[in-house]
Image (tube, grey):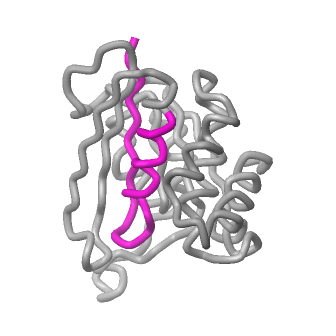
Amino acid sequence: MVTSIMIVGVGGQGSLLASKLLGRAAMDKGYDVKVSEVHGMSQRGGSVVTYVKFGDKVNSPIIDKGEADYIISFELLEAARYVEFLKPGGQIVTNSQQIDPMPVIAGTAEYPTELISKMEEAGAKVDAIDALALAEQAGSSKATNIVLMGVFSKYISEISKEEWVKAVEASVPAKFLELNMKAFEMGLSANG
């Protein structure tokens, strides 16, 4: 059995650290893990996608449409953009934050409305949480990614809280460890 996760966001939101954290937690648990990063226009606030797969034997990190068990999204529109990659009844864990894409900034488009209900209508289960606000409460908006991983950890019974904590300790610099542990805990205890 292989678990397939897509981590989607906008450049600079920390999706690569999140994928490293998830990969490390799964590897430490003894799973075969494959991670693939697709950067897009990450330098300019464009879409960033990372695939993470773990299980007894993983042949390829690539996730095709209809194959993802989970989507972790750092921004609401990014979650909606990739909903077709989710398996029927799959789970989305998303930050409710909205970051205007270039067409909205340029005034040639409007930010879509009703995104959560549209994703649910497409067959997804959606756990939307204001991860940015929780990260700021923890001490830094930069910890939004770790808040989301805390929320996501509730869905992955294969990896214990202790194993997640160990992965956080191994993935973030020591001087930011306390902040990131607080952010993880806030995500873990949040109700979306």
The magenta region covers 1-25
Q: Name the side, left or right, on which 64 lies relative to 188.
A: left
**Residue 32, image quadrant:** top left
The location of residue 106, given as percent across then percent down, is 29, 88
The residue closer to the viewer here, 3 or 31, is: 31
Image quadrant assignment for residue 152: top right
Above-or-below relation of 180 to 19: below
Residue located farthest toward the bottom when viewing the structure as drawn: 106
Q: Residue drawn at (20%, 27%), measured in percent from left and top?
A: 60
- On the image, the x and y values in percent for residue 21 come to 48, 47
Location of the N terminus by quadrant is top left
Residue sitting at x 29%, y 40%: 35
Identify whether 151 is placed above or below 146: above
* Residue 56 image offset from top left, x and y in percent: 37, 13
* Residue drawn at (38%, 53%) of the image: 8
- Is 51 drawn above or below residue 9 in the view shown? above
Percent position (x, y) of residue 129?
67, 56
As drawn, is 35 to the left or to the right of 110? left
Q: Is residue 93 found left or right of 44 in the rendered image?
A: right
Residue 139 on the magenta span: no
Q: Decide which of 111, 127 is in the foreground and name it.
A: 127
Q: Residue at x 52, y 61 (%)?
A: 172
